[in-house]
């Protein structure tokens, strides 16, 4: 439509209609009373058209607004003149314009037929309204079509609908999230309605009519009767109900549900219920787990010989576990601090200062051992560990922890210490005793170099007395004197070391050197017993880690036993073999083998027992001390009868860590 035509048709639909009539009724007829009535009627209709609360639009096939009533234009924030001549699409959202075109096209295709649709319109200020449009195409007198559209503002209804839809969606979502469905139940008609979530809880296909037999079938057989009784009574008495029961799902799994219903009466006085049904399986499971774990801890606590305590922010005891098994758990401690209880608090100020610093810093502590008293007042040793606990805001509330009576363990440790000391004393005594037995050998060891010193000194004098004195030869003799003097000095130092009660000194050692030094001390003893020694010492042996004196004591003991074992051997050479070798797996072996009488069946198990001896003057302590020395070195000492004659005593020792790898 051209803008000119719009101007011709006037500013509003009413004027347009009047204009049309003026054109159709000839001038003389307008004075005709009938024609005048008609004109009057049309004028009245103009008013109705203009102000009726319906938006009217007349649109040509191209979509141009031919006319619009004042109410319609006003609703959109325009005047009719603003809209006439413009495309009707301007008052629609861009994304809805294709729909509008299609609707107009449909009307044009189906002249005289009414069509209805709901669509959004845009006001001049950009705001939106929902309208229901009723449209119809008509043929004008000139045969051209025109589309008449009447629109009703349905924004409020739409908004209400949307709000309802949204709140329904929220409700459905909330039901899904909380695993809570809703239901309605008209007791008289047995009619039941379920929400989506209720269908899901019962695992029933949505849309099927919920029925009591189906529900009963889902309910756990053990709970069925109770459910029927509860709901039956509620229906009879018109009372609310709230109960829990189990469902057995098609896959056999069990679900816990809680149903809560409010009773109401309809207009005719019939009872009906509105309620909720919640899947409480997870809660039940959590409750069960909590109960189990609580029970588990109670069982532990009640069967433990330990006792549990709790202290407040001032570190005073607020709670102490009481159970009959714990006879040693001290009584009457409530209100006291740990340092009030411990009699050693004043004696060990540093230990307690550190402990109190840990408590004040609110950090956990472990294995604090202190003295206390049991219920009968007997002194006990207690070991305790604790950790701080706090309230939800992080405020310190105190400590919780556990105490153990460690008296027995501490006494055992003390006894072990005493035993170790006694053993060391004994080892020392036996060592000195052995040295006493070895006096002849030792004297010989020293005598030999001394004799050489004298001989060399004599020779030196002789060389000096020559004319001219042979100074070179004299110097050589003096050098030998020095060498022999050193040898004698070494022996004495060694004997003193063995005789001295010295602390154990663990150092990396060359095992072969240890063997050689020990053998040197018993050389004479072997010679006097006509015993020959064969040394098979493996070269390139990694170092061991140990105390030289103790290991030599072991070797001397084994060698002396070997010599004694061969005392009666007269028909064959008395030979002692001393071997060393690496044994793989980070260890090495040393052994002393003799060809004496060997070990009897009865003796084999008892050799290492203290005071076991078969000798008239024997003490029977040697092997037991040897074994404890070797075991203290992390090794083993064992006796093995030889294939032929005699016995082998084998020492296995771990290699020094650095050399072991
Ligand atoms: P003692 O030498 O004082 O008897 P030991 O503990 O050294 O104490 O030895 C205990 C016993 O073990 C000896 O009395 C002896 O019967 C036996 N025994 C030790 N070494 C040998 C050996 N090489 N051959 C046979 N028996 C041995």
Image (cartoon, helix red, strand yellow):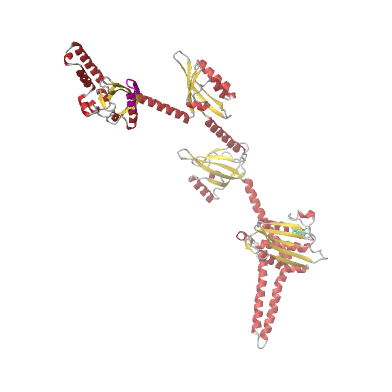
Quarter of the image for residue 502 reads bottom right
Q: Residue furthest top?
A: 33
Q: Locate residue 199, reporting x and y percent.
A: 50, 26
For residue 109: magenta?
yes
Q: Residue furthest bottom?
A: 467
Quarter of the image for residue 31 reads top left
For residue 336: magenta?
no
Q: Locate residue 543, reporting x and y percent.
A: 63, 62
Q: Is residue 476 above or below residue 69?
A: below
* Ligand 1 picture quarter: bottom right
Near-viewer residue (148 or 188): 148
Near-viewer residue (556 or 289): 289
Near-viewer residue (19 or 277): 19
589 to the left or right of 6: right
Visible in this render: residue 132? no
Q: Locate residue 18, reporting x and y percent.
A: 21, 19
Q: Which residue is at a point 37% across and 24% down the rendered structure image?
A: 160
Quarter of the figure that contains the N terminus: top left
Q: Could you tell me how many numbered marks the image carries? A: 0
Quarter of the image for residue 563 reads bottom right
Q: Which residue is at a point 51% across and 42% down the rendered structure image?
A: 388
64 to the left or right of 304: left
Q: Which residues are magenta?
A: 102-116
Q: Is residue 151 above or below residue 495?
A: above
Q: Which residue is at a point 58% across and 39% down the rendered structure image?
A: 331
Quarter of the figure that contains the C terminus: bottom right
């Amino acid at each position: 439509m051209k803008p000119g035509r719009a101007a011709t048709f006037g500013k509003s639909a009413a004027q347009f209609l009047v204009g049309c009539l003026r054109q159709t009724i000839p001038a003389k007829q307008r004075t005709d009373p009938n024609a005048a009535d008609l004109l009057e009627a049309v004028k009245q209709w103009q008013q109705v058209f203009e102000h009726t609360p319906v938006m009217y639009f007349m649109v040509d096939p191209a979509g141009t607004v031919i006319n619009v009533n004042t109410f319609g234009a006003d609703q959109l924030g325009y005047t009719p003149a603003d809209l006439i001549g413009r495309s009707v699409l301007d008052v629609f959202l861009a994304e809805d314009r294709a729909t509008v075109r299609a609707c107009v096209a449909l009307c044009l295709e189906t002249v005289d037929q009414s069509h209805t649709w709901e669509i959004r319109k845009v006001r001049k200020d950009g705001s939106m309204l929902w309208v229901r449009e009723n449209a119809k195409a008509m043929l004008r007198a000139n045969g051209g079509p025109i589309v008449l559209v009447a629109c009703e503002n349905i924004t409020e209804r739409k908004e209400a609908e949307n709000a309802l839809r949204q709140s329904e969606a929220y409700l459905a979502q909330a039901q899904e999230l909380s695993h809570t469905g809703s239901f309605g139940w008209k007791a008289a008609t047995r009619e039941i309605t379920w929400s989506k979530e209720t269908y899901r809880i019962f695992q029933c296909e949505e849309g099927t009519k919920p029925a009591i037999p189906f529900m009963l079938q889902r309910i756990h057989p053990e709970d069925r009767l109770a459910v029927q009784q509860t709901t039956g009574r509620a229906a009879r008495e018109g009372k609310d109900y709230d109960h829990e029961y189990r469902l057995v799902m098609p896959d056999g799994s069990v679900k816990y549900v809680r149903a809560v219903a409010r009773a109401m009466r309809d207009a005719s006085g019939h009872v009906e219920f509105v309620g909720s049904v919640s899947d409480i399986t997870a809660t039940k499971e959590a409750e069960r787990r909590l109960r189990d774990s609580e029970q588990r801890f109670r069982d532990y606590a009640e069967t433990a010989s330990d006792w549990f305590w709790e202290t407040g922010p001032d570190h005073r005891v607020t709670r102490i576990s009481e159970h009959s098994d714990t006879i040693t758990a001290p009584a009457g401690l409530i209100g006291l601090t740990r340092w009030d209880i411990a009699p050693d608090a004043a004696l060990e100020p540093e230990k307690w200062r550190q402990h109190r610093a840990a408590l004040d810093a609110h950090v956990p502590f472990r294995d604090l051992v202190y003295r206390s008293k049991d219920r009968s007042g007997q002194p006990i040793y207690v070991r305790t560990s604790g950790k701080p606990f706090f309230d939800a805001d992080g405020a310190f509330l105190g400590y919780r922890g556990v105490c153990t009576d460690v008296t027995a363990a501490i006494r055992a440790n003390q006894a072990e210490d005493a035993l170790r000391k006694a053993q060391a004393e004994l080892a020392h005594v036996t060592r000195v005793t052995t040295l006493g037995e070895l006096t002849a050998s030792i004297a010989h060891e020293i005598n030999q170099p001394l004799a050489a010193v004298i001989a060399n000194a004599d020779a030196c004098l002789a060389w000096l007395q020559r004319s001219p004195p042979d100074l070179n030869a004299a110097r050589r003799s003096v050098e030998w004197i020095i060498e022999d003097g050193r040898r004698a000095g070494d022996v004495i130092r060694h004997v003193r070391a063995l005789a001295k009660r010295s602390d154990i000194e663990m150092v990396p050692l060359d095992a072969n050197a240890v063997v050689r030094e020990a053998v040197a001390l018993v050389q004479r003893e072997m010679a006097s017993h006509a015993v020959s020694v064969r040394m098979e010492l493996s070269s390139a042996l990694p170092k061991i880690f140990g105390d030289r004196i103790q290991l030599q004591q072991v070797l001397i003991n084994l060698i002396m036993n070997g010599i004694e074992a061969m005392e009666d051997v007269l028909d064959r050479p008395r030979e002692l073999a001393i071997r060393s070798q690496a044994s793989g797996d980070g260890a090495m072996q040393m052994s002393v083998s003799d060809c004496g009488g060997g070990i009897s069946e009865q003796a084999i198990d008892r050799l290492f027992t203290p005071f076991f001896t078969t000798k008239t003057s024997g003490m029977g302590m040697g092997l037991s001390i040897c074994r404890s020395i070797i075991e203290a070195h992390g090794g083993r000492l064992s006796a093995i009868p030889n294939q032929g004659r005699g016995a082998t005593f084998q020492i296995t020792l771990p290699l020094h860590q650095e050399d072991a790898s």
